Image (spheres, rainbow, N blue to C red):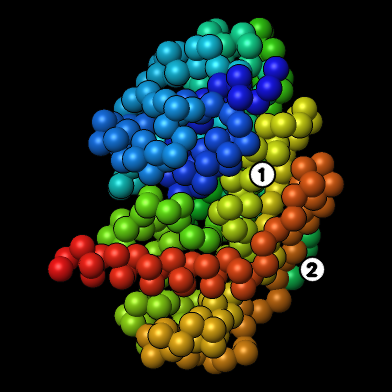
Amino acid sequence: MSNARKLILITGGTGFIGNHTVSQFLLNGYRVRATVRNQDSCDRFLSIHWRHRDSLETLIVADITRPGAFDAAVKDVDGIVHMASPFTYKITDNEKDLIVPAINGTKGILQSTVSFAPKVKRVVLTSSFASIADFSKGLRPGHVYEESQWSPLTYQATKDDKRGLAYAGSKKLAEEAAWQFVETSPGVNFSLATINPTMVYGPAFPGSAGLKHLGQSMSEIYALMDASLNEVPPTMLPAFVDVRDVARAHLLAFETDNPQRFLISGGDFDKQKVCDLLRDQIPELKSRVPVGNPGKPSIGEHYEVDCSRARSILGIEFRPFNETFLDMGHAFLEMENAEKESSL
């Protein structure tokens, strides 16, 4: 059966990574069914991907943690890429707002797959480097992270966390629940792969973002070039991967049978290096980007990330630092110009 006859369910397809992933599958001949949270998101999403309108359908799933939320969405699909995550603006209770929704949302779609999607042989889950890393140990110079390692955060520690690690714990617990479900639940007829990216940067999919509605990683970089900063902020997480490579990894993982975790990273990340690059290569940004200490990284020696499994099994090569952040800089300038023109 050709790719063109395969229907892939992609949850969370309207997000930063999601739009790029939907595009990857469409460009490679698949049909896509994407879940969206409401009708406005649906209309915008379809307009963004208008070139592939005949191969794209949407379904509204307002609350992914509701029991049976994905029962209708999984019917008649040939494969599933689960990227959606629980949505909340404010965390007041780690267990209620983070842990339970993350676990139940993940287990819910897997149960729906068992019950209503007998054709599905492959599920790809978007996880995180946070499921692997032990952030309590800081930068860990000399340590190498790879897929056999797991964050040590337990359910109780995540529930009680007051150090800002609850999100990382929820990602670990949700991924752990997915592997346990596949290994122990009756009726599972599919293999599972997880994509575990480090910090994700890169340009938004064309038409999918505006300067007033930037996600965390995009707003973090735009802050370096919007003339709002006098100093280069500290670098908290020193590894990155391009959003387009994350999207590509989801496609490649879907097309292999290996039930594996895939840790993906394009290399080292440092905000001073981003500032140096933008000031040097994009003249119109020179007066807007903080100078800091050119050529001197803002972060010291740190852990390494081993992506040899992704390279060998998926055959993926990662975009270099300069390409990712220059593309981001130019994309932000295009957004600025578009917004100026629309206000005239």
Horizontal and vertical percent position of residue 102: 47, 34
- Write the residue at 52% across / 46% down: 20
In the image, what residue type sits under mark 2?
Gly
Secondary structure of the residue carrying tag 1 is: helix
User: In the picture provided, is 311 more to the left or to the right than 85?
Assistant: right
Horizontal and vertical percent position of residue 302: 70, 71
Which image quarter: residue 65?
top left
Horizontal and vertical percent position of residue 70: 44, 19
Tell me if I can see residue 170 in this picture: no
Q: Quadrant of the C terminus?
A: bottom left
User: In the picture provided, is 63 more to the left or to the right than 286?
Assistant: left
Q: CA distance from mark 2 to mark 1?
A: 27 Å
Tag 1 residue = 249
Secondary structure of the residue carrying tag 2 is: loop
Between 303 and 187, the one lying in front of the other is: 187
Does the residue at mark 2 contact the one at mark 1 (Cβ under 8 Å)? no
- Write the residue at 45% across / 13% down: 71
* Res. 142 mark: 2
Please say if 164 is above or below 335.
above
Horizontal and vertical percent position of residue 286: 44, 89
Q: Which residue sits furthest left?
A: 344
Q: Earlier in the sequence, mark 2 or mark 1?
A: 2
In the image, what residue type sits under mark 1?
Ala
User: In the picture provided, is 219 more to the left or to the right than 328?
Assistant: left
- Write the residue at 59% across / 45% down: 247
Please say if 165 is above or below 62.
below
Please say if 168 is above or below 222.
above
- Write the residue at 75% across / 35% down: 260
Q: Quadrant of the N terminus?
A: top right
Tell me if I can see residue 307 in this picture: yes
Between 191 and 168, the one lying in front of the other is: 191
Label 2 Cα crowd, 10 Å radius (few <14 / some 14-19 / many 20+): few
